[in-house]
Image (cartoon, coloured by chain):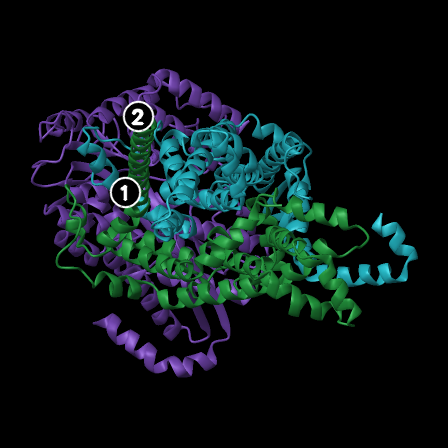
C-alpha cells in the first residue's frame, strides 16, 4: 500500500521533478519483470526524495552480457555511474572504482551484515545489493525430513535413486548435480570440510590437502546417486526426475514453477554438511559499485546517496521480500519486520539462517577467474570419474600454482 | 603491366582513375572495418590490454602495453587452447569431407530426380538459410536427454538414451550432425548447378561407349565438377574452423561437458569477453588466421593445376 | 533365329526398364527420407509451439497437439518487443543489402573489366578477406565503433556490412562473363562507362545481383554476435539477439521458445520460397569459371 502510494506520488510529481533534476546517474542491472519493477519502484521513490537526482536504470541482459558491456564501456571510457558486479569482475577493474568509505555514511557501512563485507586489496569498493545464498531444495513427498549431514544425504540418495520403469536405465535420482558449477558441486563442500583453495596468504595451494580429498571422495559418491546434468535444476526437477538439489536462493521462482509443473510441494533446507565440519554455504549474487571514470563529483555523491538509500532497512527488506534475495544489513535481518517475514515463509527463514550460520564469498584473488575455470574442469573430471580424486586434485593444484605464479 | 603502360597512356590513366572511383566505396569500408581491425588484432596479440588502469594517478580507459611473445607462450601452455585446437581440427576433418561427400551424392540424386525437384531443393536448403540461433534452439530441444525427439526416435529402434549435449564423447558428434544437416543442401545446390552445366554430349558419348552410369559419374561428372568441389571444399574448410554460433547456443554459452565443445573461436570469445584477456584472445585469433591461411595456400597450390579461376 | 533374338532384346529392355524403375523408386525413397529428416526439426518446432508445456514434455511425443495452443504466439510476441526486433532486422538487412549490391557492382565491375595500376594486389586483398575470421575483428572493431560514436546505433549494424570481399568476388565472376565487345560498342556510341555499367551490364548479371543481395540479406538477418556486442539497448536488438535474450528469460518454456523461433524463421523461408530461382541460378555461378 505504502509503495503504491509513493509510486503514485512519484507519477504525479514526475513532470515537476523532471525539470529540477540536475544530476543524472545510470545504474546497469540484469533484472526483468517483477525484479525490474521492484527496482524501478525503489528508484522512483528515491527520485521523489531527491528531486535533484535522476536515476536511469538500464537493463543489460544476463550477467555475462553485463560484464561484457561493462568491460567495453570502460575501455571506451564511458562506464555507467553504478553497476552490479561479481567479485571477479571487480578485481579486473579495481583501479577505476570509487572508495565507498569516502562517500557513504559510516553508520550505513557499519550496518552491512559482516558476512557481506568484502575488501579488495584493502579497499572497500563494493556494497552488497542482490545477494542470495545456496540452499537445498527438495520435494516434500519424497523427502519427509531433509538430511542435514553428508552421510544422511548419501543414504537418502542411495534409497531414492532407481529405475522405476524397469527398463534397465535409472530414471529417478536422489540428487541433481551440475558438473560445471564449481560452487554448487565442490566449493561449498570444501569449505564445509574445512578446506580452502589457497592458504590464507595466497602463497600455497591447499585444495589438494586432506580436506580437499575428503570433499572429492564425497563428491564422487554423491555423483553415483545424482543426475549429472549442467542444466538449471529447475529443468529436471520440473520433469519430476530428481528429489533434491542445491542451488542459489535467487532461483526460487524457477524452482517454484518447476515444482508446480511436477505437481509436488517444494521444501527448503540448509545445505547438508559433514558432522565434524561447518554449515557453510556460498553466497551468490552481486554487489554494487561506483565507477570513477567519466563521472562528476556530483554524480558520485548522488550514487553514494542512492546506495545508502538502497541499504535502508525498510528498502532492503522490501527488495528482499519481493525478489527473494537476502536483506543485506544487520538491522534489517534482525528487524521485527523481517522476523515476521521469516515466520510467515520458511524460504526466507532457511535462507537467512544459512547466511548467518555459514555464508562465505568468492576468493578475492585477482586471478580468480582462471583459478575457477580450472577448478570447474577438474570438478567435472572428478564427477565424471575420469580421474581418481587424488590424482585430479593434485593435477588441479599444479595448474592453480601455475596460474598464481 | 597495365600499370606501367598506364602511366604513359592518358586513356589508361583515366581508366585507372575511374576504376579507383569504382573501388573507393568498397575499399573504404573494407579498409576501415576489415583491414584496420585485422592489423590491430595482430598488434594486440603482442600486447597486454587492460581497462580502467591507474597510472601515475591518472585513470586510463584502455591501456595497451607490448609484452612480446608472452601471449603466445601462454596460449601453447594453456590446456583449453590446445583442447580447442585439437577439437576444432577433428571437427573440421570429419564434418567437411562428410558434408561434401553427402552433398555430392545428394546432388547426383537430385540431378536424376526430375519430379518434385523444387520441393527437394526447398527441403534440403531450408536449414542453411534458417537463422542459426533459432535452429540451434530447436536442436537443444531435440537433443534433450530425457524428453528429446532424437532419443525418442532412437528408442524406437531399440537404441538406449544418449546424452547428446551432456556426454563428452557425444558433444562433437551432436555438433557435426547439426552442421551436416545444415550445410549439405547448400553444398549440394552448388554442385547440382555445376552438374547441370556439364554438356550432355559427354554422357551420350559415354553411353555409346557402353560405360555404366556409375562409371560415367566417376569419369565425367566428378572430374568436370572439380571447380565446384574445390570451391565448396575451400569455403567450408574455412567456415568450419570458425565454428561458434551454433556451439554457443547448443551448449548454453558453455564449453560442453569436459570442454568437449570448446572450439577455437569459443576459446577466443571466452578469453576476450568472459575473461577480458584481449591480448590472449588476439593471439588465439592470429593462430586461427594462420591455420586458415596455410590451408588456403595448400589448397591453392595443390589444385592450381586443375582449377583455373582465371580462364 | 532373328525372331528369337528380337524377343531376347525386348526381354532385356523390359528388365532394363524394370531395373531402372526400381532404381528410380529407391532414389525417390532415399530423397524423401532425407527430406523428412531435414524438415522434421521444423515440424517439431511448429508442433511444440502449439503445445502446453506439460504436453511438450510428454514421451511418447504428441505429434499433432489438440487443441492447438495458439496463445503461445501472442504470449511470446508480447513477452519481448518482437515487433521492434522485426523492424530492426528488416531495416538493417535491407540497408546492408542495398549497400552491398551497390558497392559490389562497382568494385566487381572494375576488377572484371577495367585495367588499372595495382589491380592484382588489390584483388588479392579482396581474396584475403575470405581468410580473415570475422571473430578476429570483434574486439578491435568494438573499440573503433565506440571511437566513431556509432555504438548502439544503426550505423554500427549497417556500415561495416555494406560491402564484402565475397560479394565483390562474386560480382567480378559474373561481369567477367560479359563479352568485351559490348563495352566497345557502347563506348563507340559515346556512352559513359557509368551509364553502360548501370544500364547495360547490370541487367545482364541480374542473377548475380540477386545472389549477392539475398546472401547479404540472409547474413544480416542471421547475424548474432556482432549485434550482441555492438548494441546496448533492447530497442536496437535484431531477431537472433532478441531471441537469445528471450531464451534466457523463458528458460525451459519450450513451447514459447519454439513459437518465437518459428516467428524468426518464417520470414526467411518465405523470402527463399519466392526468390529461390534467382538464388539457385546465382549460386550456380558461384563455383564456376
| Left/right of residue C270 with respect to residue A157 in the rendered view | right
Count of picture labels: 2
Question: Pointer 2 and pointer 1: residues touching (CB < 8 Å)?
Answer: no
Question: In the rendered image of this protein, does residue B87 appear above or below residue C128?
Answer: above
Q: Chain of mark 1?
A: B
Residue labelled with disc 1:
B142
Closer to the camera in the image, B72 or A286: B72
Tag 1: Cα neighbours inside 10 Å, few (<14), some, or many (≥20)?
many
Residue B295 rendering spot, x and y as whole percentages: 60, 32
Question: In the rendered image of this protein, does residue C200 appear above or below residue C289?
Answer: below
| Left/right of residue A168 with respect to residue C46 in the rendered view | left
Closer to the camera in the image, B213 or C177: B213
User: Which chain has been coloured purple in this picture?
Assistant: A
Colour used to depict chain C in the structure image: green
Q: Secondary structure at mark 1?
A: helix
Mark-to-mark CA distance, 2 and 1 = 25 Å
**Residue at image x 33%, y 27%?**
C5
Residue labelled with disc 2:
A383
Question: In the rendered image of this protein, does residue C270 appear above or below residue B216?
Answer: below
Discs 2/1, front: 1
Closer to the camera in the image, C153 or A36: C153
Amino acid at each position: 500500500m505504502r509503495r503504491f502510494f509513493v509510486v503514485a506520488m512519484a507519477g504525479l510529481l514526475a513532470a515537476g521533478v523532471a525539470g529540477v533534476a540536475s544530476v543524472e546517474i545510470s545504474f546497469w542491472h540484469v533484472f526483468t519483470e517483477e525484479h525490474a519493477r521492484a527496482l524501478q519502484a525503489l528508484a522512483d521513490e528515491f527520485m521523489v526524495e531527491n528531486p535533484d537526482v535522476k536515476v536511469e536504470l538500464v537493463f543489460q541482459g544476463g550477467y555475462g552480457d553485463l560484464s561484457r558491456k561493462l568491460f567495453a564501456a570502460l575501455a571506451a571510457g564511458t562506464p555507467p555511474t553504478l553497476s552490479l558486479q561479481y567479485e571477479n569482475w571487480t578485481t579486473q577493474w579495481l583501479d577505476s572504482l570509487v572508495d565507498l568509505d569516502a562517500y557513504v555514511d559510516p553508520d550505513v557501512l557499519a550496518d552491512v551484515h559482516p558476512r557481506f563485507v568484502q575488501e579488495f586489496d584493502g579497499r572497500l569498493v563494493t556494497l552488497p545489493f542482490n545477494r542470495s545464498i545456496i540452499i537445498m531444495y527438495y520435494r516434500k513427498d519424497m523427502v519427509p525430513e531433509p538430511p542435514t549431514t553428508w552421510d544422511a544425504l548419501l543414504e537418502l540418495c542411495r534409497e531414492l535413486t532407481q529405475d522405476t520403469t524397469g527398463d534397465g536405465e535409472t530414471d529417478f535420482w536422489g540428487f541433481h548435480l551440475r558438473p560445471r558449477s564449481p560452487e554448487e558441486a565442490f566449493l561449498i563442500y570444501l569449505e564445509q570440510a574445512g578446506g580452502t583453495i589457497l592458504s590464507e596468504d595466497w602463497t600455497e595451494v591447499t585444495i589438494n590437502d586432506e580436506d580437499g580429498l575428503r570433499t572429492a571422495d564425497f563428491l564422487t559418491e554423491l555423483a553415483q546417486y545424482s543426475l549429472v546434468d549442467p542444466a538449471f535444476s529447475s529443468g529436471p526437477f520440473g520433469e519430476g526426475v530428481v528429489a533434491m538439489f542445491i542451488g542459489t536462493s535467487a532461483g526460487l521462482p524457477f524452482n517454484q514453477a518447476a515444482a508446480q509443473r511436477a505437481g509436488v510441494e517444494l521444501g527448503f533446507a540448509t545445505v547438508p554438511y559433514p558432522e565434524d565440519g561447518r554449515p557453510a554455504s556460498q553466497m551468490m549474487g552481486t554487489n554494487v559499485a561506483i565507477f570513477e571514470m567519466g563521472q562528476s563529483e556530483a554524480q558520485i555523491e548522488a550514487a553514494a546517496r542512492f546506495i545508502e538509500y538502497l541499504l535502508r532497512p525498510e528498502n532492503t527488506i522490501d527488495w528482499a521480500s519481493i525478489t527473494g534475495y537476502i536483506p543485506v544489513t544487520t538491522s534489517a535481518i534482525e528487524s521485527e519486520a523481517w522476523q515476521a517475514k521469516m515466520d510467515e515463509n520458511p524460504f526466507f527463514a532457511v535462507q537467512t539462517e544459512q547466511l548467518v550460520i555459514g555464508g562465505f564469498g568468492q576468493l578475492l584473488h585477482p586471478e580468480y577467474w582462471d583459478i575457477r575455470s580450472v577448478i570447474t574442469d577438474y570438478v567435472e573430471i572428478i564427477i565424471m570419474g575420469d580421474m581418481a580424486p587424488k590424482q585430479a586434485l593434485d593435477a588441479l593444484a599444479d595448474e592453480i600454482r601455475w596460474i598464481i605464479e | 603491366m597495365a600499370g606501367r603502360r598506364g602511366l604513359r597512356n592518358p586513356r589508361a590513366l583515366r581508366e585507372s582513375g575511374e576504376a579507383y572511383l569504382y573501388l573507393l566505396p568498397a575499399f573504404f569500408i573494407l579498409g576501415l572495418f576489415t583491414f584496420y581491425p585485422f592489423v590491430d588484432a595482430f598488434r594486440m596479440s603482442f600486447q597486454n590490454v587492460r581497462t580502467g588502469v591507474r597510472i601515475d594517478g591518472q585513470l586510463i580507459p584502455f591501456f595497451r602495453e607490448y609484452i612480446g611473445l608472452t601471449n603466445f607462450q601462454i596460449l601453447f601452455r594453456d590446456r583449453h587452447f590446445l583442447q580447442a585446437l585439437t577439437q576444432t581440427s577433428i571437427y573440421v576433418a570429419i564434418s567437411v569431407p562428410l558434408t561434401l561427400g553427402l552433398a555430392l551424392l545428394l546432388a547426383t540424386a537430385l540431378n536424376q530426380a526430375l519430379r518434385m525437384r523444387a520441393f527437394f531443393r526447398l527441403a534440403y536448403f531450408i536449414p542453411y538459410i534458417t537463422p542459426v540461433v533459432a535452429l540451434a534452439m530447436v536442436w537443444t530441444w531435440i537433443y534433450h536427454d530425457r524428453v528429446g525427439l532424437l532419443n525418442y526416435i532412437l528408442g524406437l529402434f531399440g537404441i538406449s538414451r544418449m546424452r547428446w549435449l551432456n556426454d563428452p564423447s557425444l558433444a562433437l558428434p551432436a555438433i557435426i550432425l547439426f552442421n551436416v544437416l545444415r550445410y549439405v543442401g547448400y553444398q549440394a545446390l552448388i554442385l547440382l548447378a555445376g552438374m547441370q552445366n556439364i554438356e550432355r554430349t559427354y554422357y551420350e558419348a559415354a553411353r555409346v561407349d557402353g560405360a555404366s552410369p556409375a562409371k560415367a559419374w566417376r569419369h565425367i561428372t566428378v572430374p568436370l565438377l572439380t571447380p565446384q568441389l574445390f570451391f565448396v571444399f575451400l569455403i567450408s574448410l574455412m567456415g568450419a574452423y570458425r565454428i561458434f554460433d551454433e556451439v554457443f547456443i547448443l551448449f548454453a554459452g558453455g564449453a560442453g561437458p569436459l570442454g568437449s565443445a570448446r572450439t577455437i573461436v569459443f576459446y577466443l570469445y571466452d578469453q576476450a569477453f568472459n575473461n577480458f584477456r584481449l591480448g590472449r584472445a588476439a593471439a588465439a585469433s592470429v593462430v586461427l588466421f594462420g591455420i586458415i591461411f596455410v590451408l588456403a595456400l595448400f589448397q591453392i597450390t595443390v589444385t592450381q593445376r586443375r582449377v583455373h579461376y582465371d580462364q | 533365329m532373328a525372331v528369337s533374338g528380337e524377343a531376347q532384346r525386348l526381354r532385356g529392355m523390359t528388365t532394363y526398364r524394370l531395373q531402372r524403375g526400381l532404381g528410380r523408386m529407391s532414389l525417390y525413397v532415399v530423397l524423401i527420407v532425407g527430406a523428412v529428416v531435414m524438415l522434421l526439426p521444423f515440424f517439431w518446432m511448429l508442433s511444440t509451439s502449439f503445445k502446453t508445456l506439460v504436453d511438450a514434455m510428454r514421451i511418447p511425443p504428441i505429434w499433432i497437439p489438440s487443441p492447438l495452443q495458439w496463445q503461445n504466439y501472442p504470449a511470446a510476441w508480447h513477452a519481448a518487443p518482437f515487433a521492434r526486433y522485426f523492424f530492426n532486422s528488416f531495416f538493417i538487412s535491407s540497408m546492408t543489402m542495398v549497400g552491398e549490391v551497390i558497392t559490389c557492382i562497382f568494385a566487381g565491375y572494375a576488377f572484371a573489366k577495367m585495367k588499372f595500376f595495382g589491380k592484382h594486389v588489390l584483388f588479392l586483398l579482396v581474396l584475403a578477406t575470405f581468410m580473415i575470421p570475422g571473430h578476429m575483428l570483434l574486439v578491435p572493431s568494438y573499440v573503433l565503433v565506440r571511437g566513431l560514436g556509432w555504438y548502439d546505433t544503426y550505423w554500427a549494424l549497417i556500415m561495416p556490412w555494406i560491402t564484402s570481399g565475397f560479394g565483390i568476388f562474386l560480382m567480378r565472376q559474373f561481369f567477367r562473363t560479359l563479352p568485351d565487345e559490348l563495352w566497345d560498342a557502347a563506348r563507340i556510341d559515346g556512352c559513359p562507362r557509368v551509364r553502360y555499367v548501370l544500364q547495360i551490364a547490370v541487367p545482364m548479371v541480374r542473377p548475380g545481383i540477386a545472389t549477392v543481395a539475398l546472401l547479404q540479406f540472409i547474413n544480416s538477418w542471421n547475424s548474432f554476435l556482432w549485434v550482441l556486442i555492438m548494441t546496448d539497448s533492447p530497442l536496437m536488438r535484431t531477431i537472433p539477439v532478441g531471441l537469445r535474450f528471450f531464451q534466457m528469460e523463458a528458460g525451459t518454456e519450450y513451447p514459447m521458445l519454439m513459437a518465437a523461433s518459428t516467428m524468426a524463421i518464417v520470414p526467411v523461408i518465405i523470402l527463399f520460397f519466392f526468390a529461390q530461382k534467382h538464388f539457385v541460378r546465382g549460386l550456380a555461378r558461384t563455383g564456376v569459371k
